[in-house]
Amino acid sequence: MLGVVLCASLSAREYHVSKKGNDRHDGSRIKPFLTISRAVQCAMPGDTITVHAGNYREWVNPIRGGENDNKRIVYRAAPGEHVEIKGSEVIKNWKYVKGGVWKVTLPERFFGDYNPYRDLIFGDWFNDYGRIHHTGEVFLNGKSLYEKETIEKVFDPVPDTSIMDPEGSIYTWYCESDDKRTTIWANFHDRDPNKELTEISVRRTCFYPENPGINYITISGFHFSQAATQWPAPTAEQVGLISTHWNKGWIIENNVIHDSKCAGITLGKERGTGHNVWSSDLGSVYNDGNVHYIEVLFRVLRNGWNKEQIGSHIVRNNTIFNCEQAGICGTMGAAFSVIENNHIYDIWTKRQFGGDEIGGIKLHAPIDVLIRNNRIHNTVRGLWLDWMTQGTRVSGNLLYDNDRVDVYFEVNHGPFVADNNVLLSPNALITRSQGGAFIHNLFGGMVITRPDHRRFTPYFLPNSTDVAGLSIILAGDDRYYNNIFIGTGENSDHGLSGYDNTRLPNWIEGNVYYKGAQPSAHDEHFLMCPDHDPELLLEEKDNAVYLSFDPGPRFTGYKARIVSGDILGEARIPKAPFTNPDGGYLMIDTDYFGNKRISGQNVAGPFLDLPSGITSLMLWQNNTGTTAK
């Protein structure tokens, strides 16, 4: 407390942190602090903490935030300097056992108040595949090893040929722990861990305020990695490498975030409104996660979930990879936020455990959220918007090489909008929802619609967290305008024929169908090109992503009207209009690249000015350190 008083100032100032510093210094440029945690004690609203090059192995636990957008507390890496914040420690003194296997024994005092080799991954909707998993992890030269449930599997590892990196899967580890010591065995094969960079996760997070109410923080330009994060179920306290913890107005930008045991960024709820309530409520008469989540929702509302207090975050220009549960996730705390220009990939690649919360971006209750210009690939589900998606717009995103689906809307009632997206995985879209509008998208994979009569899920008053009611998913009440669908040949099951028998009506117009993709019986004013192959080809080269595409000779002569909120009407269940996330008038009058659509010259799909014949479009270009389109 004395440190806080001594650091206080009447005007905004900048505190410096350096590996050459000392925590007894004053934090000035010439006398910097040694740790970020020391600067945390000093920073007041309006102040900036500038961290200089090096590895900082600490949990940054802010004790206060800013007052508003103009008076933030800013945490930033010094411009042009490489700053790592790690949840791990370097481990030496490994003892050779045999056959490439080494071991190290650490006293309990090494871990302090948290030992991730005694903490099992656990939570609602988590699937352990019948074995134990610890939150800890072992890294060799920055690459994580594979935990095994028996020591025999460390001495005699078998490659997992079902995953992306079967060769890496033979680098294995196992641990035993009691209240006095922890022993870790690891198979490093031909590497000597005492001569390499060998690290183990020891902290549960890298940047997370222990208490709610820490608003208006900016985190910019860091590398975050190697924390022992726990499974962040939507009914639990959600903690990732970076976590907002039920606060408002954070900006998380230009960071590289990787190698989290579970989640990279969490924009989620706190513990007081419930923590894994379904798994813990074994005596309940309701053996149903749906009921437990509804109970959590009403507790969260009583705890002040509204636009004035929670959400309104900006998550932009980050690179997120090697997280085994999600790149970005959050329940209710992401409301009113913007998530843009992030590159998210290699999520759930080791596949040692599973569950229903795994994806590139997985959000519950993304009310009035704008998700745009993100690149998401090599995940299981690229973008998964689950429960209470209302007022949300998904625009200009690039998704491909995702195992199960690019975009999944689950048990939502709308209104929500997906426009100008490029979706190229075998399953481009699954919607177990109603009240959606899909406009000017390129669907390179299947579109699947499903009802859900088992679950009653909430909907809200427009642009609000006030619950208006609950309903099942009847399916339908969707709008498809000016999209492109590409099939796989004659009698393809791609297209919109799945909408022929939905319970609720649909509005479908202005779409183009290639290579056997089928329209719906409800389609109006559409273009069929069953014999034309657009020769769709996606290539990653020279830090960019290119799409080759031949729209064919009939495409440019086919014109589509410009779509606005007036055309889309109201989503039937919530009786709410289609608007922008801020409540403003919705007009889909630009393409994927931001080019202006002009009435009378507008075309289907996400791209304007396509010539006849094969053309190559650069859809994404990486910047140095981070990525942005």
Image: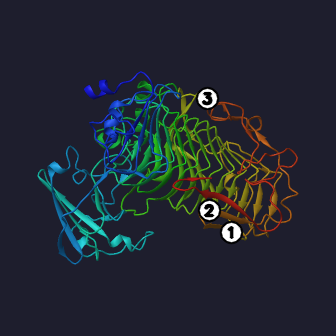
Residue shown at 73%/57% (left/top)? 484
Examine the rendering and report whether any part of residue 142 can be seen. yes
Horizontally, is 587 left or right of 127 in the view? right
Q: Nearer the viewer, mark 1 or mark 2?
A: 2
Residue 213 rendering spot, x and y as whole percentages: 40, 28
Residue 36 rendering spot, x and y as whole percentages: 34, 41
Instruction: Using the numbered discs, state the Cα–Cα distance from disc 3 to disc 1 in whole angstroms.
Output: 40 Å
- Badge 3: residue crowd in 10 Å (few <14, some 14–19, many ≥20): many
Tell me the number on the disc at residue 544.
Answer: 2
Q: Nearer the viewer, mark 3 or mark 2?
A: 2
Three-letter amino acid code at disc 2? Ala
Residue shown at 69%/50% (left/top)? 420
Residue placed most toward the observer, 377 or 437:
377
Instruction: Using the numbered discs, state the Cα–Cα distance from disc 1 to disc 2 in whole angstroms.
Output: 26 Å
Horizontally, is 537 left or right of 98 in the view? right
Tell me the number on the disc at residue 462.
Answer: 3
Three-letter amino acid code at disc 3? Pro
> Looking at the picture, does residue 178 appear above or below residue 330?
below
Residue placed most toward the observer, 177 or 504:
177
Three-letter amino acid code at disc 1? Thr
- As helix, strand or loop, the secondary structure at mark 3 comes to loop
In the image, farthest residue toward the front: 30
Q: Are marks 3 and 1 in contact (CB under 8 Å)?
A: no
The residue tagged 1 is 488
In the image, farthest residue toward the top: 10
Instruction: Using the numbered discs, state the Cα–Cα distance from disc 3 to disc 2 in whole angstroms.
Output: 39 Å
Residue 469 rendering spot, x and y as whole percentages: 54, 29
Residue placed most toward the observer, 165 or 604:
165
